[in-house]
Image: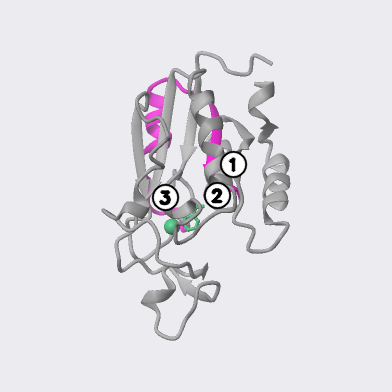
Amino acid sequence: MNWIDESSALLIVDVQNDFLPGGSLAVHEGDQVVPVINTLQGNFKTIIATQDFHPADHGSFAANHPGKNPGDFIELAGLKQILWPVHCVQGSQGADFHPNLNQSHWKKIFQKGKNPQVDSYSGFFDNARRGDTGLGNYLKSIGVRRIFVCGLALDYCVKFTALDAKSLGFDTFLITDATRAVNLQPKDGESAIEEMREAGIRIVTSKNL
Ligand code: VGL
Ligand code: ZN
């Protein structure tokens, strides 16, 4: 109770059309986070969003690797990379935020995944931890110490964003009813929550904030 204080920020991860039902990388029930997040936004002074924003030639797209399919693995930036359907291409409707998501109080949007040579699940760093979006320094510069993470998808971008937030020293919370998992394997969402809990991230619901 009363977890939200003056130093708190709500971080809304990738609530974009391609991750919602009907999108190219649709997350089951992904649209159900929208009303929950809109209600949550009323409790925060600082609201930041991330946006997956790939060039069309991005190396994480199966379509850019002849003979490969979504779900196959390659090596990208020296890392094991799962291949995705084409999604969140810069300037496409799939990269836009859900039309009902209230954007009117957002302080800033941080885009990621713009380098075709490396994927970027976290809103802070690319997967090789070379590129930095500036999100961490920005949050520190405005006095944020506590971060509440929500959005899509729980087992990818939400998880890596929350783990990086924690590793950068922010007091980090995951809001479980404001996120949904891709679940390529049926338990991926549950495992992601367990991994976050073990890293010291607090697991909460929007009802007990
Ligand atoms: C995401 C896969 C590929 C996400 C982004 O937002 O969770 N997942 N790109
Ligand atoms: Zn992506």
Q: Residue at x 33, y 64 (%)?
A: 116
Distance CA(mark 3)–CA(mark 2): 12 Å
Q: Residue at x 60, y 46 (%)?
A: 180
Judge by depth and name the residue closer to the eye, 67 or 26.
26
Q: Which residues are magenta?
A: 128-154
- Quarter of the image holding residue 173? top right
* Residue 78 location (% of width, % of height): 47, 70
Residue that carries the numbered disc 2 in the rendered image: 153
Q: Is residue 51 above or below residue 67?
A: above
The numbered disc on residue 17 is 3
Q: Residue at x 62, y 33 (%)?
A: 175
* Element type where label 3 sits in the image: helix
The numbered disc on residue 179 is 1
* Element type where label 1 sits in the image: strand
User: Mark 2: is the Cβ under 8 angstroms from ligand 1?
Assistant: yes
* Residue 166 location (% of width, % of height): 58, 37
Distance CA(mark 2)–CA(mark 1): 7 Å
**Amino acid type of the residue tagged 2 in the rendering:** Ala
